[in-house]
Image (cartoon, helix red, strand yellow):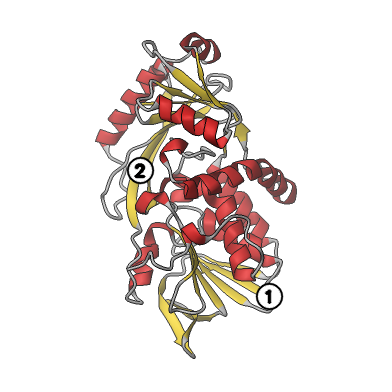
Amino acid sequence: MSKQVVIVGGGVIGLLTALNLAADVDQVVVCDQGEVGRESSWAGGGIVSPLYPWRYSPAVTALAHWSQDFYPQLGERLFASTGIDPQVHTTGLYWLDLDDEAEALAWAAREQRPLSAVDISAAYDAVPVLGPGYRRAIYMAGVANVRNPRLVKSLKAALLALPNVTLREHCQISGFLHEGGRVAGVHTEQGVLAADEVVLSAGAWSGDLLQTLGLRLPVEPVKGQMILFKCAEDFLPSMVLAKGRYAIPRRDGHILVGSTLEHAGYDKTPTGDALESLKASAVELLPALADAEVVGHWAGLRPGSPEGIPYIGAVPGHAGLWLNCGHYRNGLVLAPASCQLFSDLLLGRAPIIDPAPYAPEGRLG
């Protein structure tokens, strides 16, 4: 297909969109206001599941299931082509003392997902470092986590190896170029970038850019803070989640604990209060972390959206402009499916799933 595509935003959604389109269009340019992959895609935990999948709509579930099945081969493909391993690490996930355990189990039966109640003694046998006092557990086998900073590094490397893809970092977009009744590019600090199609995948900043067209996209920044411990490689064999906080083991013994949910605008400053709160949660969940070194503490901005349902598709009334944004807490989880669905729509192929729930039409103000 003879097309020039400009993608605004170089997080995992923008980068994977570019990778999916590159084989079928003439030229792809990815613009990011900073370094690609350094915002929420870098800052998140990388669990390849919504934290509480049964609490989401079927629209989120459909994307999540497709992505979960696809992630292992995506990781292998990127590792083979770039030498950078995204480390898709399958550990399973334990939820402890859930208030809505019955709903979770009913959802699993309905969706045919491998989630079941387990005796609490079995959870303690499987995760001996678990803190005392938990009474109930459910477990889903096969849940993986991806080492998201390495995922975006491998995506960047894969794109840099393609002759028809250009990454423009530190490239601020101020608005959209209109010609002949359609969006025909973007205005940047370095001049105009012309395009046949413009894709807005700018995470928490997507709403601000659409405002320049008089459109209201209900996507807003939601701050999340995380801490990172360094432990022995075999310290934590499975992901665990209780009281809204989770611990994620990486293959090399790093343990991620998160996260906060804060409405603080675009402020990404890590705070002492959050650090103490996360430490307390970490030690309650895994008491041995009291003696572990905190090797990192940071904050990122999620692209908050109503019900966490992303916007994927063409913007009505603005030919040439597309959205792939608003994934809220599940950008890394939903990225493979979202970007495949998006590519199907832009290229006119049969979509992998029903695109109707994600269509911007009727959802913009």
According to the picture, the residue beneath numbered tag 1 turns out to be: 26
> In the image, is residue 5 above or below residue 158?
below
The image shows residue 302 at horizontal and vertical percentages of: 39, 50
| 136 vs 66: above or below | above
Q: Secondary structure at mark 2?
A: strand
- The dot on residue 67 is none
Give the residue drawn at x 58%, y 70%.
29
Q: Relative to 83, is 215 on the left or the right?
A: left
Residue 174 versus residue 214: which sits nearer the camera? 214
Residue 107 location (% of width, % of height): 48, 33
Which residue shows up at 61% across the image and 33% down it? 89
Numbered disc 1: secondary structure: loop
Residue at image coords 54%, 47%: 62
The disc label shown at residue 224, or none: 2
Camera-nearest residue between 286 and 110: 110
Q: Position of residue 191 (x, y in %)?
A: 47, 81
Task: Report whether residue 294 is seen.
Answer: no
